[in-house]
């Protein structure tokens, strides 16, 4: 194989050099002898000059050599590894120097002699340490298990686990093994940063049910009664309770599970009295007393013409139109998949994901998108344009994908940011109104224009007879100029 020395031997005064196109196939394609004079070999890291007949290092490589030399000179006791790196660099650069040799000082020679004399008797002690915890875990496609100091934790994988990690059999066993270790650490109250229990709601449920000697499969099913998102909402309260128990040197788990005076903690008269006091002092109240006029947002969206929208604007436009046209939550919108869509007139979206409102007796709502007379604010047409624009770049079956590479599924948090951005661009006070206010605005506008209450409840997905809309969502639409316009 040719080397830099071969190139140096082929170089002649004022010869021509060229970059070849067949650099990756040169040794596989025969070149006629007549045309070989037009070809050359090229080695990265050296500059060959046929006019001055010199081979030199490029600037960046010279700087690298100088930097390594300076590092060694500024360190009176360099490591063998840093010396080896410098020697390797100098050897590589030597074809571009007139010397390429090194002289050893007396001190350097003494160091080499030390190696010769002492190498046979030299050794380095192996560091030993005692681990704080030794955890054994295992996983299969059905479930996981963990053991620490004889304490066991186990469980079956839930639907929520597979939704978070991947899709069924496509999850690699290594992923499940890592998740098993993580679940074991959480279930057994082990933290790598602080040696104290880190308890969450799921742990309380699992530990409580395990006291009744229930099968693991039954515990897993009962633990899935609340979604991960629901537990996350209450995680701050669980953390405060855990910190309080640590401060008092109590067991947070035992305190939660134990009866008080032989009475279940939820029925103890002191707890009941306390909770009533909390309810009176901080009664549940709706977030908003008014809501914004959807027409303000629609005017903004109408100005973003479908034919000229880039991915960023089209994403904002679609999520805003769907939020207004369906009255659905951000979690529902983020769960829509391509396979859920029945293309037709009108377009129907039959949600297949497990939602917060999904129960045995209440199925997911079917979202209906009729064609609207104004194409610029038509949810159905905007959805078609969005699917067409993203079909070659998407890496997810979810309808909404991120606007940056690698274009994976957009989370509910991402969709919330998009909706808040739409409100901000429309001039609506985002200090007051958040992403969820789209649901208030949509359902309130429908009610104002005479849509039957039962129809609103059914389309949005609330339980039949639910008072949620009347208590928390049905709000007057704010018209900040109505008073002045009337008077003047």
Image (cartoon, rainbow, N blue to C red):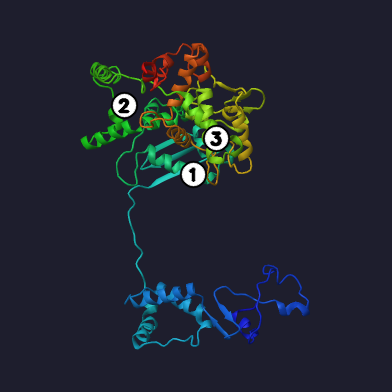
Of 218 and 3, the residue lying toward us:
3
Would you name the residue on which mark 3 appears? 304
Q: Residue furthest front?
A: 488
> Is any part of residue 384 visible from this angle?
yes
Q: CA gap, disc 1 to disc 2?
A: 30 Å
Q: CA gap, disc 3 to disc 2?
A: 56 Å
**Residue drawn at x 42%, y 19% as measured from the top left:** 477
Number of dots carrying numbers = 3
* SS at circle 2: helix
> Is any part of residue 206 visible from this angle?
no
**Residue drawn at x 67%, y 67% as measured from the top left:** 24
Of 33 and 211, the residue lying toward us:
33
Instruction: Indicate whether 456 appears above or below 322.
Output: above
- Which label was assigned to residue 177? 1
Of 280 and 234, the residue lying toward us:
280
- Which label was assigned to residue 257? 2
In the picture, residue 223 is in which quadrant?
A: top left
Instruction: Indicate whether 438 appears above or below 26.
Output: above
- Which label was assigned to residue 198? none
Is 92 on the left-hand or right-hand side of 28?
left
Q: CA gap, disc 3 to disc 1?
A: 48 Å
N-terminal of the pair, mark 3 or mark 2, is 2
Please identify, in this view, whether the residue under mark 3 or under mark 1 is nearer the observer. 3
Image location (x, y in percent) of residue 39: 70, 76
Image location (x, y in percent) of residue 73: 35, 78
N-terminal of the pair, mark 1 or mark 2, is 1
């Amino acid at each position: 194989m040719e080397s830099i020395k071969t190139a140096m031997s082929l170089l002649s005064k004022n010869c021509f050099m060229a970059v070849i196109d067949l650099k990756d196939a040169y040794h596989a394609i025969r070149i006629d002898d007549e045309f070989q004079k037009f070809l050359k070999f090229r080695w990265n890291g050296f500059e060959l000059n046929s006019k001055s007949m010199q081979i030199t290092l490029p600037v960046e490589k010279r700087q690298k050599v100088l930097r390594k030399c300076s590092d060694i000179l500024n360190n009176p006791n360099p490591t063998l590894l840093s010396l080896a790196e410098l020697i390797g660099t100098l050897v590589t650069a030597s074809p571009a120097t007139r010397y390429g040799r090194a002289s050893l000082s007396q001190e350097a020679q003494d160091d080499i002699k030390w190696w010769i004399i002492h190498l046979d008797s030299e050794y380095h002690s192996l560091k030993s340490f005692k681990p704080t915890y030794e955890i054994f875990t295992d996983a299969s496609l059905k479930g996981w298990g963990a053991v620490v100091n004889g304490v066991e934790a186990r469980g079956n994988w839930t639907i929520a686990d597979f939704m978070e990690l991947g899709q069924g059999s496509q999850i690699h066993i290594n992923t499940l093994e890592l998740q098993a270790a993580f679940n074991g650490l959480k279930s057994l109250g082990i933290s790598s940063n602080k040696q104290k229990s880190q308890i969450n709601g799921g742990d309380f449920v699992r530990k409580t049910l395990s006291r009744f000697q229930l099968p693991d499969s039954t515990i897993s099913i009962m633990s899935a009664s609340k979604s991960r998102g629901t537990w996350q909402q209450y995680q701050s309260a669980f953390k405060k309770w855990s910190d309080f128990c640590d401060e008092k040197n109590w067991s947070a788990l035992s305190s939660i599970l134990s009866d008080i005076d032989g009475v279940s903690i939820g029925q103890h008269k002191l707890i009941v009295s306390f909770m009533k006091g909390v309810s009176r002092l901080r009664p549940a109240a709706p977030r908003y007393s008014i809501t914004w006029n959807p027409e303000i947002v629609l005017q903004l969206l109408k100005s973003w013409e479908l034919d000229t929208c880039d991915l960023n604007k089209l994403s904002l436009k679609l999520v805003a139109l769907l939020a207004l046209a369906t009255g659905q939550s951000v979690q529902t919108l983020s769960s829509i998949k391509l396979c859920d869509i029945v293309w037709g007139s009108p377009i129907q979206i039959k949600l297949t994901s497990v939602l917060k409102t999904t129960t045995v007796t209440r199925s997911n709502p079917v979202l209906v998108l009729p064609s609207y007379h104004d194409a610029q604010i038509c949810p159905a047409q905007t959805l078609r344009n969005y699917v067409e624009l993203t079909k070659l770049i998407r890496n997810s079956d979810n309808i909404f994908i991120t606007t940056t590479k690698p274009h994976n599924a957009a989370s509910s948090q991402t969709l919330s940011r998009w909706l808040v951005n739409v409100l901000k661009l429309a001039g609506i006070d985002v200090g007051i109104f958040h992403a969820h206010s789209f649901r208030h605005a949509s359902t309130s506008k429908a009610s104002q224009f005479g849509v039957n209450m039962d129809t609103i409840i059914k389309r949005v997905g609330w339980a039949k007879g639910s008072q949620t809309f009347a208590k928390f969502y049905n709000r007057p639409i704010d018209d900040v100029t109505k008073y002045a316009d009337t008077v003047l």
